[in-house]
Structure formats: C-alpha cells, structure tokens
Image (cartoon, rainbow, N blue to C red):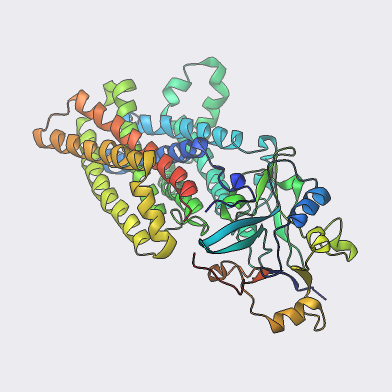
Amino acid sequence: MSPMWGSTAQYEVIHWSWAIAVYLFLAGISAGSIIVALLVKWNRHERSNSSIWDAMIKSGTLVAPVSILAGLFLLVADLGRPLSFYWLLIRFNPLSVMSLGVLFLLIYTPIVLVFTLLVFERTIVKYTWLLPLGSFIEWVKSLHSYAKTIEYFLMAAALCVGSYTGFLLSALYAIPLWNSPVLPIVFLTSSISSGIAVNILIGLVFFKSTINTESIKYLLVLDLRVIMTELPLLGIFFVGLFYGGGEVSSVAKAALSHGGLALVFWLGVIGIGLLLPLATVILALRSHVYRVRYILTNATAVLLGVLLLRYYIIYAGQIYLG
Amino acid sequence: MAKAYRLIFDENLCIGCQACNVACRLENDVPEGVYRLQVHVTTQGVFPHLGMHFERRSCVMCDEPPCVSVCPTGASFQSKDGLVHIHESQCITCKYCILACPYHARFINPLKNVVEKCTFCFDSRLSKALDPACVSVCTTEALRFGDVSQENSAVAMLSRKETLLFPKAHLGTKPKVCFIPARKGVKV
C-alpha cells in the first residue's frame, strides 16, 4: 500500500541500468570467446605452435580484448563519479565480489592482449609504427616453453571473468531474484554460448579464408550442448526461487508473468535466444550443410538472447523486490 | 569502551507528525526529493475498523552490515562503535551498497553525487554526546536513543520491559534500530 504520508520514489530507482546489463554481456562475450578460442586451439589444432591460426582463434582473440575494453569503459562511465574509479585499483576488499572482479580483470585483460598480439603478429609487423610491439612479441615468443601453462592460466582467468558477474549479483540477499546460487552457472553457460556465436559470426565475416568446417562443426556441437545445459539451468533457477517460499516465490511468479519483462524473458531469452538457435543448430548438424545463412541466424539469435537475459535479470531483479 | 547504541521507535506513541523527518533534513542538509529518514503513514483495516500505522524508514545501523562487505573501496565502513558510515571521498558511486541494503536506506545525494544515508547525526551531534536530531525533537518520546550496555540508560530499561522487534531479523543483519509494535491491531 502506498503511504498517505511519505515518498516511495527513492526506493523505486533503477540503480543498475542498461549499461550494467551491456557490461555483463560484453564481459561474458569476452570470456566466452577466449574460452572457445582456447578449446579450438587445444582440440582442433594439430600443432600447438602452428602459425596459421584457425579463424575461430583469430576471431576469439580479436573479440575478447575489444569487448572487455568496451565493457570496462561502459562500467566506469556508469559510475556516479567516473573519475574516482582509481579507488577500485588502490583499495581491495576480499569480501566484495566487485573487488574480486577488478582483480580477475587486472589479470585477465593483459594476458588477453598479449595473446591477441601473438595471433595477429603478421598483421602487426606490416606497420612500421607498430615496430616496438614487434620486439615485444619476439620477447613473448621466447617464453614459448611456458605457452601451455599461460594458456591454462588464461582459461582459469576467463572462467573467473565469465562467472564473477553472476556472483556479483547473487551476493546480494536484498534482491531475491539475484540471490540464487545457480545464477553464476547460468551466466557462465550463456557467456560460453555467446562466445561460440560471436566467434563464428566474426570468423565468417572477417576470416573466411582460414575457416575450417571441422572446427565450425565442433563449435556447433558444443553450442548444442551448451544450449541444452542452459535451458534446464534456467528451469532450475526459477524452480529454486519458487521453492524459496514467501516473497521469493512471489517475486519469481511476478518476474515470469508480469508486463513487458516477462515478454522479454519468454520471447527474447527463451524463444529467440535458446529455442531458435537450438532448431537451427539441429538443422545444420542433421543435413551436414553449414549454410552461411543458417549459421548467421543462429549466431545473431544467440547473441541477442544472451544480451536480453542480462537485461532481464538486471531489471527484473530491481523491479520485483517482493 | 565500545558503545552499544540502540534506537527504539515506539509505534504506539508515534503520531506521524514528521518532526523527526524535518529535523533530519535541517540537521543534515538533505536535498529535496530524497530522505535519510521518513515515517510512512498508512491506513490499515476495513471500515469501520480502521487504524493508522507508522513505519520509520531509515538506516537501521546493522551490526552485520551487507553494505560494508560489498563495498569494493572501503568507502562504506563500520566504526568501532558499530556504526556504519561512508567516506565521501572514497565513494565511487557504484551503487552496489544501495542494492545490497535490504532496508533501502541508501540513496544518491543528487547534489554531491555520492551515496548517503542516516548517520545517527554522528558528526554534528552524536560525537558531541548529543542525541540524533530526530530523537531530540520527537514530541511524544516515541524515539529513544542510547547505549544499551549502560544498565540505567532509558533504552536499556525500555529493552528489558518491552518486546522489541528488529526489522527483517531473519536476515541476520542485527539492526541497532528496533521498534515496539503497535498493541492495537487491525485486520489488514
């Protein structure tokens, strides 16, 4: 009941807006595309030091730094006081998931940038003004005996970046829709899904000459598995909320049945983001025809679905508080 | 010795005059449109069995504050006396604490662009051994404030006598603000 005296306006402010949703999406894409690039490198490359990189590795190492840097820019710009962001770097609170996220990103981002330099070495050495980078690349290459260890480390960092965004939200018990132990797994799964989609998309558009149909097939099978994991995970997420009782149950019911946000979930996240890609992947794998149109539709739908999932969770969490 | 502050709001004595709200705004220069403290007045029940309900909305000064543990920069901190404060200069306004607070006590000061909330008037009054502004102006003594570890303090005596309710106690935040629920009930 709204009070006859007093204002409730300040309790209804959306403090984390679309910018945070887009950041979660970009961080997920970045982590996902690197995870996928590493999987392709480990499982699809015959020689680990091959200099002809698979298109999937190229697109992964191109997308990962661009999206994480764009995401971080958005994140800082969304702060109420963007210029004071340096406090995040000089203070550390191990209890705060945001602080842990900063730590993960400080480890993750530089390794990703170095990985990108290595993969695009031939492009970089073409430009004279990038020469200093060339000698840096040579130095990094002299460490090649540690390559596998660094790759495992990067994989771990990417898994941390892909899942911390879920923990960031699930740590808040004031927000019933976010306070679920399943949320980080949902986010990690969907970020891997978006990584597959974006790598295929960028690979098809920019690196067509180095595309290996076998690795596309490998990724489509992986995509199928990821989607088949994500669907039940989302089910478990909401069932868990229903079983939470009291206001948690009513929040879950409202979030799934009220207004435009419920539509975003059912139509956007489930319909476009999961069922449509599921259908196209099965179709492509069945007929063994990797028609570009199918694959592009699939990738675009997955990306839209992953973005809408972040958007839905961010907004529904703050609107339906019980 | 560390203090054990407690603020008791007696719903039975409150008349909804908002003197506390106004005193808070004056004492702390709270900008228009936002509140560190307000008393929500609602009518409850079905005619002719109606009743008024008064609910204090403010920071409850948790002993286990979720806003402090989520703060990435340590701007949101707890003092030795267990009071939760904000270092304005270290606050980057990431709004994580606002979302973490189950009592919706925090807001962004639109003039300074930093997160703000009730401080029990620490700088201007409490540190000079004065009661918070809201308590000092309460016309019906519905607000009592003091140190419960002092046996003879008004809040300690009231705590022994009355049944106290701690808002959202099931969350384990251990608030220092509590209330004596209205004895006259109405069917909601």
In the displayed image of the protein, which residue is found farthest to the left? Answer: A287
* Residue under the point 63% across and 63% down: B65
Q: Nearer the viewer, residue B115 or A55?
A: B115
Residue A78 lies, in percent from the top left, at 59, 36
Counting every numbered tag in the picture gives: 0
Residue depicted at x 34% and y 21%:
A206
Residue A31 visible in the picture: no
Residue A248, located in which quarter of the rendered image?
bottom left
Can I make out residue A253 in this image?
yes
Q: Position of residue A99 (x, y in %)?
A: 59, 51
Quick one: A245 or B24, which is closer to the camera? B24
Nearest the eye: A185 or A207: A185
Between A316 and A215, the one lying in front of the other is: A316
Among the 4 quarters of the image, the one containing residue A62: top left
Residue A247 against residue A254 in the figure, above or below: below
Residue farthest to the right, as pictured: B128
Quadrant location, the N terminus of chain B: bottom right
The spot of residue A229 in percent (x, y) is 27, 51
Instruction: Name the image quarter holding residue A274.
Output: top left
Whole-percent x, y for residue A295 in the image: 23, 29
Tell me the residue at 60%/54% (across/down): B104
